[in-house]
Amino acid sequence: MTLLGAAGVLIGLLLVLLAGLVWRLRAVRASHDRARARIAALLESDGAGLAVWDSGGRLVACNARFREFYPEVTLQRGLEFEDLVRYTATRAVVIVPEEEIEDWIEKRLAGRAEASTETRRTPDDRRIEIRMRPTEQGETLLVYTDVTAACAAAAGAAAAAPSATAQAAALRVLQEAVAVGHEAGSFHQAVRDVTRLLAESGGWDAGTAYLAAADGSGALVSTGVWHVANEQVAPLATRSAIDACCDDADDQVLRRAVASAAATWIANVTVDPRLSDARRDALGGIRSICAVPVSSAGRVVAVVELFAAASTAPDPIRERLIVSAVGQLAHVIERERAAFTPAAAPDAGFQPG
């Protein structure tokens, strides 16, 4: 091979290598663009205050809800994480006892790469849950969630309880439901987690969820997602029968939940006229049900239904707890909608995963 020929081969190899590098650079850039777009969608869709900090502890982005916690501060890109933490404690954004301020600041700075959750009171007597979550890229996600209503619901649910243990249990259920709402990877997983929480805490034997049609017709479709605490009460045959008739036009329980956006608790399904014959037959040995709607953007998007073998009279305090816990599923739906919408046609229906 001549020197000129060898040079030509070398140049060809270099061109191939260069083309490969250019392709990889474009792929990486496209991946980063998609990640930025998803972060932007999540920042503006979630009801919580969210902020993202890079591995060096500088602010990358935050949403409008997060800025509301700092009305006197301009939260600009590049803001030091330490400066915000110190401001939060010393200016009473949340209340930290004076003797604990330095220790609180130190722990938050040292634990930036670790997941943590705490609830603090604000000067106007709200309850704010503060969560830090590290990402695989070394970033830190800071989430502020106003859990005042959840705490009040938990306190109300335990108001008639004679012991502090019951109150603590109710609060724990609400806190875990809030965490599911903001951290679950999919709607189906969130349904399993929330129905499990309610079954364990309230004596329900099983639970499932149905999706409401996007056209506003009130029609329901079974997700096929169940949590079963007692297989004898809700065996596979019973679950299949319930799934099959969830959209029975003669049934007034699930339809009412969609139309009114209000929960319905039935103590004895064998005598209640609101159930259709098909639904009553499908329930088998189940005696009590509670249907709770999930609302997002002003309309009911899903209904969660709980089942028990025992006839249980409606309890307003327990019902408020159930409604608050189930309501957290709306956050999961909103996140999935934000991720789904850019790739969907404007009039496409949304189906949680």
Image (cartoon, grey):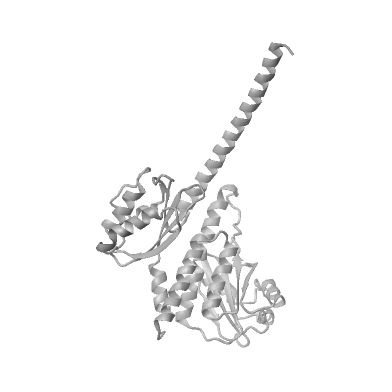
Instruction: Tell me how many marks there are.
Output: 0
Quarter of the rendering occupied by the C terminus: bottom right
Q: Nearer the viewer, residue 136 or 284?
A: 136
Task: Return the residue nearer the eye: 2 or 240.
Answer: 2
Residue 275 percent coordinates (x, y): 62, 81
Query: Looking at the image, which residue is at 63% across and 79% down?
Result: 230
Q: Is residue 192 above or below residue 335?
A: below
Q: Residue at x 50, y 47 (%)?
A: 137
Residue 74 in sight: yes
User: Residue placed at 42% from the left, 80% from the top?
Assistant: 165
Q: Residue furthest right?
A: 1
Q: Is residue 336 left or right of residue 108?
A: right
Looking at the image, residue 60 sits to the left or right of residue 70; the answer is right
Inspect this view and state whether residue 216 appears. no
Residue 242: image location, x then y, percent: 67, 75
Quadrant in which the N terminus is drawn: top right
In the image, residue 148 sits, relative to residue 137, either above or below, namely below
Quadrant in which residue 114 is drawn: bottom left
Q: Nearer the viewer, residue 25 or 297?
A: 25
Rendered location of residue 241, percent (x, y) = 70, 75
**Image location of residue 345, percent across then percent down:** 60, 49
Identified at 60% across, 56% down, the residue is 349
Q: Is residue 6 left or right of residue 263?
A: right
State the image quarter where residue 285 is shown. Answer: bottom right
107 in relation to 157, above or below: above
Q: Residue furthest left?
A: 98
Q: Is residue 222 left or right of residue 299?
A: right
